[in-house]
Amino acid sequence: AQSVTQLDSHVSVSEGTPVLLRCNYSSSYSPSLFWYVQHPNKGLQLLLKYTSAATLVKGINGFEAEFKKSETSFHLTKPSAHMSDAAEYFCVVSDSSEDKIIFGKGTRLHILP
Amino acid sequence: DAMVIQNPRYQVTQFGKPVTLSCSQTLNHNVMYWYQQKSSQAPKLLFHYYDKDFNNEADTPDNFQSRRPNTSFCFLDIRSPGLGDAAMYLCATSGTRDRGYNEQFFGPGTRLTVL
């Protein structure tokens, strides 16, 4: 069975400092992993995805994530936070053995001026 | 631009009064999904269509129904809304049914209020 855990429900960083949003997954097979961002009262937008190609994945808006099989992690990072990054972030896992995708509970990112 | 459109963006209904939410897409995707998202929670899949093939999640209440008259449009019908159905409803599309490898494209959502 697959599952995904976002280790922090809230993260606060100052503008211009690095961002780290943590995600661990459990999957019986080779998973596909996604990060989505949701701004208030908006739909979800795909930031990046991992589908068994390069383990370091670059996404939009300067975000990237590294797939680490040994640690079963797919943490999202950004070198320098911007005020517009304040939003909810969802880590999502799927594998070909199950016809489902599983959302993490989300991490709310706060950017301090 | 190709996109997923939801109407209305905000819907207010009364307890027990049927309501229909609308989703349309210009992506020509085979698969369309409806999610329910309550405050500070992750989206919860209600059902999806693969072309005209309807797939209901096991725990989706009978109060929720869906129609897909053609590739572009999909509707969510709530037959007798209760206070617990107040939520954001998200429509999404995907190019294939293989959710493991293809991302979903989300609409902006419809926020439903039940009085």
Image: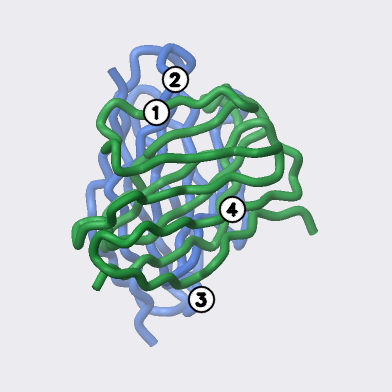
Chain colours: A blue, B green
Query: Which residue reaches farthest right?
Result: B1
Placement of B30 over or under B104, stated as above or below? above
Query: Which residue reaches farthest bottom?
Result: A113
* Disc 2 element: loop
Is disc 1 in contact with disc 4, using a CB cutoff of under 8 Å?
no
* Disc 3 element: helix
Residue at image position (35%, 29%) is B57
C-alpha separation, residue under disc 4 versus residue under disc 3: 27 Å
Is disc 1 in contact with disc 3, using a CB cutoff of under 8 Å?
no
* Disc 4 element: strand
Neighbour tally class for label 1: few under 14, some 14-19, many 20 plus, Cα within 10 Å: some
Numbered disc 1: what chain?
Answer: B
Residue pointed to by mark 4: B23
Can you tell which of label 2 and label 1 is closer to the viewer?
1
Amino acid at the residue labelled 2: Asp
Residue pointed to by mark 1: B56
